[in-house]
Image (cartoon, rainbow, N blue to C red):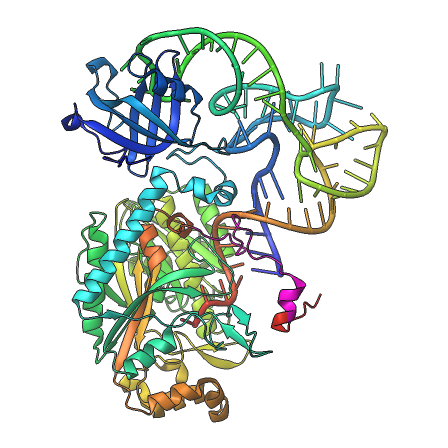
RNA sequence: GGGGACGUAGUUCAGCUGGUUAGAACGCAUGCCUGUCACGCAUGAGGUCGCGGGUUCGAGCCCCGUCGUCCCCGCCA
């Protein structure tokens, strides 16, 4: 390049620059060779500009243009010219001008790329990931990386403006047995000892607050050695937030403001305050702890009218869903739905159509027309509607059975919402789910586990039931949901060590075990812990939603596959025996 | 750990009921071309049909196993 400086990016030039001499640099996206006239489409992350090379203007530039191939790196000096009306390209923002090459610098050659570097992706993801550096060269990918950067910037600006400070926490830490499986790596100095990568900075975060941190945040990498999905990677990024002396109201307000400023980046106006719903209602009406409220379908728990229970042996309660205006559903549609309901775990499915002439349902034969009418009107159905019933044959309506029914109802609701296209595109439905149960009973282990994590505070009013009825206790935990996807979760933490100890006891941790695992933390709790609470937001998920992508790999520069492999650098990989030896490790087969 | 889909040229795909020499488009190479913008035209090269085994006179196609990618369940406090 010598002393030359780039004057513009490839997406910059407009009519207003006509007549100027400019210097552009970028990659050759396309070459159209008409003999004594060669067009080059020059691309960088901002877009594409057409470059014209003719021998009349510069024989040398034209000669080099003949050599040039796709993805060669070139610099072009020349005059910006207005195009003739007939040659304007309305597809390109820069399409009213072109650069007449006076000098063409061949800065680097390139192998023929394995796939075309175009915005429209048709290439298998496997190939894209293997050559990620080429995949990223697409303008569309660059746009997403830049959106992610803007989002990170907005987070830092907003949080800083609310007196939160960013503090880094260690990546080399110790394994904690609670929660997700840890990624671990060995210590060379301490044989047989291992570091773990943090699943989240949770404990450090709380310790920072105990240390007087007051308001902390961090955009931080987290690591979990579990199985992966479209919205889950082995390493992912959280916006981790913790504050002292919080009320849930203040925390919600701060987070809603943060979300508002993030979505403003993609011109989405969010309406505040966000809706709130208890876990219990979410499960009952929507069959999910992260309901999509972008469409108006809600289940109702129902019981058979007296006299009908003996005729139909299903669990009480069962669930009913009014589907407005779906009275004309075909038999095959209903059959498919029934199939899906059974696949989701329901074992009783029924329906009733309502029209001007009344209620029509195969159920009538079993429990009588009158009973069906009672159910249908209980579901709030009107003429033209369909009512779907879902139930279990289970004898007892215990917690496990009810939750099985709820889950099936949630699947079915989403399926209907999608199939009937009830979700308006461009809907941004934010929701706080609150009042989660503190504990979940594990049927296999026959013990309670923390639903959020063991440092979550129970509600004050539930404290006296902690030992007597742990299953009934509600936690001060909350999830943030957007369009049916969990984008964040947090809680008010326990700041009193006596309560923390009681929680450990319910979880089946003896004082000795608790001390062994969390001794340093319990000591800290006894050292003047302020009331505190926080939340972790899924940065990858949020950016993906902002970018209109359903897969977080699309907003991560170098993601891994579902089996946690990096296809580009082929990680993980074996290591030399010497390296193993130094770490005091031997591979078992 | 389980279920589903996919794997054929550099890329995206087609390939019938198992039958001769596995095709198309794009890309690539060479030549021609001064207004193209998915340039055009002509010619050409390019295949471990993921891998291994089996059935068969004969396998891209059928069977078994295996590997990889994607989606889902379990799992992910």
Farthest residue, direction front = A3
Q: Is residue A466 magenta?
A: no
Count the numbered circles shown.
0
Q: Magenta residues, as a range?
A: A558-581
Q: Please say if B54 is above or below A317.
A: above
User: Residue at horizontal 42%, vertical 31%?
Assistant: A72
The residue that appears at 55% across and 77% down in the rendered structure is A189
Regarding residue A182, the answer to whether it shows in the image is yes
Image quadrant containing the N terminus of chain A: top left
Report x, y in % for residue A390.
43, 59
Main secondary-structure element of the magenta-colored stretch: loop
The percent coordinates of residue A113 (x first, y second) are 48, 33
Judge from the rendering whether residue A187 lies leftward or rightward of residue A466; answer left or right: right
- Horizontally, residue B6 falls left or right of residue A29, namely right
**Res A11 quadrant in image:** top left
Look at the image and tell me whether residue A367 can be seen: no
**Residue A427 location in percent, x, y?**
25, 49
The foreground one among A264 and A36 is A36
> Quarter-wise, where is residue A329 in the image?
top left
């Amino acid at each position: 390049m010598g002393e030359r400086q780039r004057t513009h990016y490839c997406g910059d030039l407009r009519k207003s620059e006509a007549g100027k001499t400019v210097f552009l640099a970028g990659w050759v996206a396309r070459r159209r060779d008409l003999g004594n006239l060669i067009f080059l489409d020059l691309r960088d992350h901002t877009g594409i500009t057409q470059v014209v090379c003719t021998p009349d203007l510069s024989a040398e530039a034209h000669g080099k243009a003949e050599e040039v191939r796709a993805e060669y790196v070139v610099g072009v000096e020349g005059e910006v010219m207005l195009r003739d009306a007939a040659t304007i390209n309305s597809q390109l923002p820069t399409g009213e001008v072109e650069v007449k090459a006076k000098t063409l610098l061949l800065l680097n050659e390139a192998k023929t790329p394995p796939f075309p570097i175009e915005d429209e992706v048709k290439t298998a993801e496997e190939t894209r990931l293997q050559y990620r550096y080429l995949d990223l060269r697409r303008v569309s990918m660059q746009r997403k990386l830049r959106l992610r950067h803007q989002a990170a910037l907005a987070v830092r600006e907003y949080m800083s403006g609310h007196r939160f400070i960013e503090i880094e926490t260690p990546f080399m830490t110790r394994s904690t047995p609670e929660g997700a499986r840890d990624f671990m790596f060995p210590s060379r100095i301490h044989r047989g000892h291992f570091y773990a990568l943090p699943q989240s900075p949770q404990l450090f975060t709380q310790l920072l607050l105990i240390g007087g941190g007051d308001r902390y945040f961090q955009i931080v990498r987290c690591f979990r050695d579990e199985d992966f999905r479209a919205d889950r990677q082995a390493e992912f990024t959280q916006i981790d937030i913790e504050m002292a002396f919080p009320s849930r109201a203040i925390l919600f307000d701060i987070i809603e403001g943060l979300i508002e400023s993030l979505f403003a980046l993609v011109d989405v106006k969010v309406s505040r305050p966000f809706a709130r719903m208890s876990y219990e209602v979410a499960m009952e009406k929507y069959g999910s702890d992260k309901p999509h409220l972008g469409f108006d379908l809600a289940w109702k728990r129902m019981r058979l009218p007296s006299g009908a229970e003996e005729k139909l042996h299903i669990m009480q309660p069962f669930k009913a869903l009014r589907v407005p205006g779906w009275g004309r559903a075909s038999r095959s549609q209903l059959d498919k739905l029934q199939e899906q309901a059974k696949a989701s775990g329901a074992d009783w499915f029924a329906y009733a159509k309502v029209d001007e002439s009344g209620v029509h349902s195969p159920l009538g034969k079993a429990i009588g027309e009158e009973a069906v009418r009672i159910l249908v009107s209980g579901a709030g159905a009107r003429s033209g509607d369909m009512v779907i019933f879902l139930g279990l044959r289970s004898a007892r309506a215990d917690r496990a059975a009810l939750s099985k029914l709820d889950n099936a109802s949630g699947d079915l609701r989403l399926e209907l919402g999608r199939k009937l296209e009830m979700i308006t595109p461009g809907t941004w439905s934010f929701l706080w789910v609150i009042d989660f149960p503190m504990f979940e009973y594990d049927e296999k282990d026959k013990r309670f586990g923390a639903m959020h994590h063991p440092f979550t505070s129970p509600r004050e009013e539930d404290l006296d039931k902690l030992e007597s009825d742990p299953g009934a206790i509600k936690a001060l935990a909350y999830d943030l949901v957007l369009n049916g996807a969990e984008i964040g979760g947090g809680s008010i933490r326990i700041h009193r060590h006596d309560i923390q100890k009681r929680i450990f006891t319910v979880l089946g941790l003896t004082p000795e075990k608790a001390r062994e695992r969390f001794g340093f933390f319990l000591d800290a709790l006894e050292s003047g812990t302020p009331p505190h609470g926080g939340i972790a937001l899924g940065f990858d998920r949020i950016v993906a939603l902002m970018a209109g992508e359903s897969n977080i790999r699309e907003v991560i520069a170098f993601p891994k596959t579902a089996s946690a492999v990096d296809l580009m650098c082929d990680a993980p990989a074996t290591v030399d025996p010497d390296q193993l030896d130094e770490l005091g490790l031997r591979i078992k087969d």
